[in-house]
Amino acid sequence: MTLEKTVADLARRVTVLEAEADIRRLQARYMFLCDTPCPEFGVLDDDHRIDLIMELYTADAVWEGVGEYYDGQFGRAEGADAIRAHFKRFWGEKQEPELLLNAHYLTSEQIHVDGDEATGQWIHMQPWLFSDGKSLLRSSRLNNSFRRTDDGWRITRTRTENVFVAPLAPDWASDHPFTSVLMKP
């Protein structure tokens, strides 16, 4: 192999590694902003939180929940306006019981870069705690798509497929959120 080919191969490999790292940070930022309470904003300022989430998406993106339970609860949102409305239903409207905590944990990551397009798969676990003392543990498969834009990598599809939703034991987190490190004093 010539030096020129070696350098070209290394440059290509570095480009893919950098894309993977950017996509990993993008997906982590999305999850961070979706966590409730959002460590960056506490429990307030949900419109700003939604604005920041929308910056992660392309204008033609799709957000969809699929599989038993997720079809009816999350459905499909196509385009920025529909995705914004989807998030407004979670944070912009008062719901009872109030969702006090949801935290996203990702594992089993796979990122596949092909030029300016990429896909990523993860397994996701998420506890939900409600103001009435009930709580759930959710798990889903994420099968997301990304595109490199002039502003960096952006999400073109968030696809969450239900694996299971199970109730947690009553009061397993009874001190939350008052002792949570996520809450601002």
Image: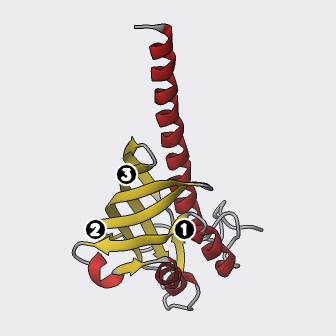
Earlier sequence position, callout 2 versus callout 3: 3
Q: Which residue is mark 1?
A: 34
Residue highlighted by disc 2: 162
Residue 179 in sight here: yes
Residue at (51% x, 34% y) in the render: 15
Question: Quadrant of the image for the N terminus?
Answer: top left
Vertical side of 168 occupied by 111: above or below: above
- Secondary element under disc 1, as helix, strand or loop, is helix
> How far apart are labels 3 and 1 at the CA level?
20 Å
Q: Are marks 2 and 3 in contact (CB under 8 Å)?
A: no
Question: Mark 3 or mark 1, which is nearer to you?
Answer: 3
Q: Position of residue 167 (x, y in %)?
A: 33, 73
Q: Please, what is the three-letter code of the amino acid marked with disc 2?
A: Asn
Instruction: State which quarter of the image contains the C terminus.
Output: bottom right
Give the percent coordinates (x, y) of residue 89: 50, 86
Q: CA distance from mark 2 to mark 1?
A: 17 Å
Relative side of 114 to 155, left or right: left
Q: Is residue 98 left or right of residue 164?
A: right
